[in-house]
Image (cartoon, rainbow, N blue to C red):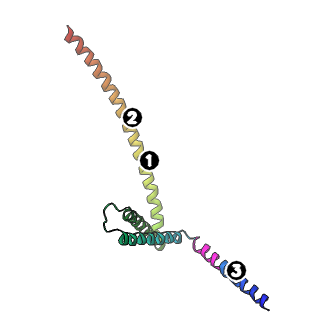
Amino acid sequence: MCGHGAGDNEKKVESRSTIFAKKCGKYLSDRWNILDSITLVIYFTTFLLRIVTWVKSASVTNNRALVVAGYLYGLNSMFLTLRAFGHVMETIKGVGAIQIALFHIIGDVATIFWQFLATSLAFSIAITKVYMAEKSYITKESYKDDRL
């Protein structure tokens, strides 16, 4: 009987770990949950770096751990802002379509901007070449007049 009971316990442990793995896999299948997990990891890392800095260092100047904590805090703030805007987009149906249209408009404006920049650069190069050729011709002509 004891051997049979031990097998049942192993099956329960296996099934618990399998259930836990399935639940974790389901939780991490959503990208927002992954972002939330990353945010938590960054927050705890920032917190630990701040505590280590507080315990080990008396000065805040030239403190690399404090600088890294500041960078992580900024990154975490960016992720939280992204999450907040994502939540707004999920709750208001019309915002997603507007955002897609806005991204297409921004892409089109960027294309027009680069075309304008390329045209301006090409025109500037051509005008500069004409100007330099004309200036060198005028300089040569005035040099001949000065010699005489």
Residue name at image x 72 percent, y 83 percent: 10
Residue name at image x 58 percent, y 74 percent: 27
Q: Mark 1–mark 3 contact, CB under 8 Å?
A: no
Percent x, y for residue 132? Answer: 31, 25
- What's under tag 2, amino acid-wise? Ala
Residue position marked by numbered label 3 in the rendering: 14
Residue name at image x 35 percent, y 71 percent: 54
Q: Residue furthest bottom?
A: 1
Percent x, y for residue 141? Answer: 25, 14
Q: Which residues are magenta?
A: 19-28
Percent x, y for residue 117? Answer: 38, 42
Label 3 residue SS: helix
Is residue 85 or residue 102 the one in the foreground?
A: 85
* Front: mark 1 or 3: 3
Residue name at image x 66 percent, y 82 percent: 16
Residue position marked by numbered label 2 in the rendering: 122
| Residue 88 can be seen, yes or no | no
Task: Give the spatial CA distance, label 1 vs label 3.
Answer: 56 Å
In the rendered image, which quarter is residue 124 located in? top left
Q: Is residue 141 above or below residue 28?
A: above
Q: Is residue 107 left or right of residue 15?
A: left
Residue position marked by numbered label 1 in the rendering: 111
Label 1 residue SS: helix
Label 2 residue SS: helix
